[in-house]
Image (cartoon, rainbow, N blue to C red):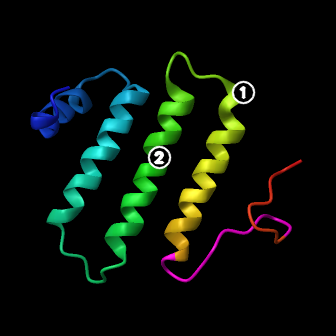
Amino acid sequence: MDPSNLRAGMAEKLAGEGPIDAETFNAACFMLTRSLEEIEFAVPEAAPLIRRLLRVCGRVAIDMGVESSSADVWPNTREMAIEWIDEALRDLGYGVAGAKGDQHDQPG
């Protein structure tokens, strides 16, 4: 997909009747992050939060949703997602804690 015409290419792919693939999903997340600059949010913290969450969504889709994906990389992908979500929350004065209250606690 030509980056200079990302919106038109994305609209065409999303308008199709077939399912979208992980690469298209990731490209949609990227396109949406670029469009955040055009939105006037009531609070300045909204755009960076949305940007980081879309980044997480796109990355997880690519790591887990392409034909060559392997469940073996899930622990690394999950940790990366948690770290990026934690970064987004820390900018708002919060943080990620595991179920037991430990930072980044992973299920055993």
Query: Label 2's element?
Result: helix
Residue found 80% across the figure and 59% down from its top: 105
Q: Look at mark 2 in the image and give the residue it sits on.
A: 57
Query: Label 1's element?
Result: helix
Q: Earlier in the sequence, mark 2 or mark 1?
A: 2
How many residues crowd mark 2 within 10 Å: few (<14), some (14–19), many (20+)?
Answer: some
Q: Measured from the top left, where is residue 60 in percent x and y? A: 53, 40
Q: Measured from the top left, where is residue 47 in percent x and y? A: 32, 69
Give the magenta-colored segment's residue range.
91-100
Residue found 31% across the figure and 83% down from its top: 43
Q: Quadrant of residue 49?
A: bottom left
Nearer-the-camera pick, 10 or 94 = 94
Q: Look at mark 1 in the image and give the residue it sits on.
A: 72
The kind of residue on which mark 1 rests is: Asp
Q: Quadrant of residue 46?
A: bottom left
Q: Measured from the top left, where is residue 37 in percent x and y? A: 19, 64
Total residue callouts: 2
Whether tag 2 and tag 1 are in contact, CB under 8 A, the answer is no
Which of labels 2 and 1 is toward the front?
Answer: 1
Q: Is residue 104 above or below residue 59?
A: below
Q: Measured from the top left, where is residue 64 in percent x and y? A: 57, 30
Answer with left or right where residue 67 lies relative to residue 3: right
Asked if residue 67 is among those painted magenta in the image, a careful observer would answer no
Q: Residue furthest top?
A: 67
Q: Residue furthest right?
A: 108
Nearer-the-camera pick, 108 or 14 = 108
